[in-house]
Amino acid sequence: MDVKVEYFNNTENPLEYTKKTKDDLFLIISDMIMPKMTGLELKRAIDNDDILR
């Protein structure tokens, strides 16, 4: 089994990555306090995105 780990230093890049990747995402670990968006806001953005549902 190949496991790929991606690191991001802001909330915009992982949100775009989840929309574009063809990989099956298993786990997202996020800091709660980040620039531009909190970890909870990132989760809500993923949950509310039609492409990611």
Image: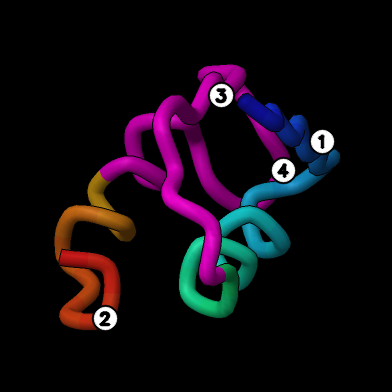
Pair 4/2: label in front: 2
Tell me the residue that label 4 is attached to. Answer: 35
Task: Report how far apart the C-alphas of labels 1 and 3 lie in the structure.
Answer: 10 Å
Which image quarter is the N terminus in? top right
- Mark 2 residue crowding within 10 angstroms, few (<14) / some (14–19) / many (20+): few
Q: Which mark is residue 51?
A: 2
Residue 37 part of the magenta-drawn span = yes
Q: Earlier in the sequence, mark 1 or mark 3?
A: 1
Of the two numbered discs 2 and 3 on the same chain, state the one appearing first in sequence.
3
Residue at (54%, 20%) from the top-left corner? Answer: 29
Q: CA distance from mark 3 to mark 4?
A: 12 Å
Measured along the vertical axis of the image, is residue 34 above or below residue 12? above
Kindly state the secondary structure of the residue where label 4 is placed.
Answer: loop
Helix, strand or loop at label 3? It is: loop
Find disc 3 in the rendering and name its residue. Answer: 30
Q: Amino acid at mark 4?
A: Pro
Pick whichever, 16 or 41, lies toward us: 16
Q: Depth-wise, is mark 3 or mark 4 nearer the camera? A: 3
Q: Residue at x 72, y 61 (%)?
A: 13
Q: Amino acid at mark 1?
A: Tyr
Q: Position of residue 23 (x, y in %)?
A: 53, 57
Instruction: Give the mark nearer the N terminus: 4 vs 2.
Output: 4
At x 49% / y 29%, what residue is drawn? 28
Which residues are the magenta region? 22-43
Q: Which amino acid type is shown beneath numbered disc 2?
A: Ile
